[in-house]
Image (cartoon, rainbow, N blue to C red):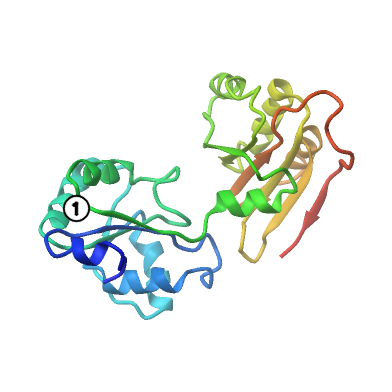
């Protein structure tokens, strides 16, 4: 069984919950350890069973899969916890990237912690870190904000709370709300440097860099599609920002 340091010993009396990071696009971006864990666990709990089966089929993994998403996690959590306490091992996966980050899973992790069931992370792909390192913005300190509120008033209040943060900001956004979110960034945070990272690791991967106002015009000028991660410059002292603005992009 995977997790040799303590998972093997723990499984003698109870199961282990593995938090398995899966590709955010390119199916080659999966670790050998992740594939081994997915083969060896007793059960895979997936945000979308159809989605994870594409990965499993690619690597010839035949495993029992159950759904675990925002609409059933309250009912499914005690079922999975019971399986873990009986000695079965479970791998939790999201549709893409690292589970629990802006995805279902916290409830199950918390239940396992409270029940002294081992929780073992199996690290790997993450849109947060991929976007951050490709953004061209400082990566020594960052604050992950998840998805901002959908409604403009709530979103602006949300941004006001981080206005003075010196760390680089990373957030997810729907392509449909991208232009509006960028406009709120301009009006609440000021015209900071931003990177819009779209469809990371996929065929149509694109990173657009520029000021928030420049990217508003770009976003309103055409239909933005795919998964979007925003990286936003943190608060800086006046006159400190380095030179070199303007939109630039990279293709696949």
Residue at x-position 13% and y-position 65%: 12
Give the position of the N terminus as an image quadrant. bottom left
Residue that protrudes farthest toward the right in the picture: 243
Q: Nearer the viewer, residue 71 or 244?
A: 244
Residue that protrudes farthest toward the bottom in the picture: 60
- Say which quarter of the image contains residue 177: top right
**Position of 242 relative to 94 (above/below):** above
**104 displayed left or right of 236:** left
- Say which quarter of the image contains residue 43: bottom left
Task: Kindly tell me whether residue 227 is visible in this rendering.
Answer: no
**67 displayed left or right of 179:** left
How far from the left and from the top, in percent, is residue 182?
69, 33
Q: Which residue lies under the disc numbered 1?
A: 80
Q: Nearer the viewer, residue 155 or 136?
A: 136
**Position of 10 relative to 27 (above/below):** above
Answer few, some or many: residues within 10 Å of disc 1's Cα (few below 14, many 20 plus, some between 14 and 19): many
Q: Nearer the viewer, residue 122 or 197?
A: 122
Residue at x-position 19% and y-position 53%: 80
The secondary structure type at the circle numbered 1 is helix
Give the position of the C terminus as an image quadrant. bottom right
How far from the left and from the top, in percent, is residue 172?
56, 41
How far from the left and from the top, in percent, is residue 31?
47, 70
**Position of 32 relative to 174 (above/below):** below
């Amino acid at each position: 069984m995977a997790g040799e340091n303590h998972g093997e010993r723990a499984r003698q009396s109870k199961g282990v919950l593995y938090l398995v990071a899966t590709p955010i696009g390119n199916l080659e971006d999966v670790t050998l350890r992740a594939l081994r864990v997915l083969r060896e666990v007793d059960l895979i709990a997936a945000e979308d069973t159809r989605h994870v089966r594409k990965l499993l089929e690619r690597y010839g993994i035949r495993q029992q899969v159950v759904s675990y998403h925002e609409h059933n996690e309250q009912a499914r959590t005690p079922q999975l916890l019971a399986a873990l306490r009986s000695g079965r091992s479970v791998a939790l996966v999201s549709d893409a990237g690292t589970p629990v980050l802006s995805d279902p899973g916290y409830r199950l992790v918390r239940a396992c912690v409270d029940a002294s069931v081992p929780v073992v992370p199996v690290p790997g792909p993450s849109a947060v870190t991929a976007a951050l390192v490709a953004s061209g913005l400082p990566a020594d300190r960052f604050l992950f904000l998840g998805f901002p509120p959908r409604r403009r008033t709530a979103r602006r209040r949300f941004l006001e709370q981080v206005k003075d943060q010196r760390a680089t900001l990373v957030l997810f956004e729907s392509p449909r709300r991208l232009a509006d979110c960028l406009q709120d960034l301009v009006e609440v945070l000021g015209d900071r440097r931003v990177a819009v990272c779209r469809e990371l690791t996929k065929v149509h991967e694109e990173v657009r860099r520029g000021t928030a106002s420049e990217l508003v015009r770009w976003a309103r000028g055409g239909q933005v599609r795919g998964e979007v991660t925003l990286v936003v410059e943190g608060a800086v002292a006046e006159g400190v920002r380095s030179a070199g603005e303007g939109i630039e992009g990279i293709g696949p």
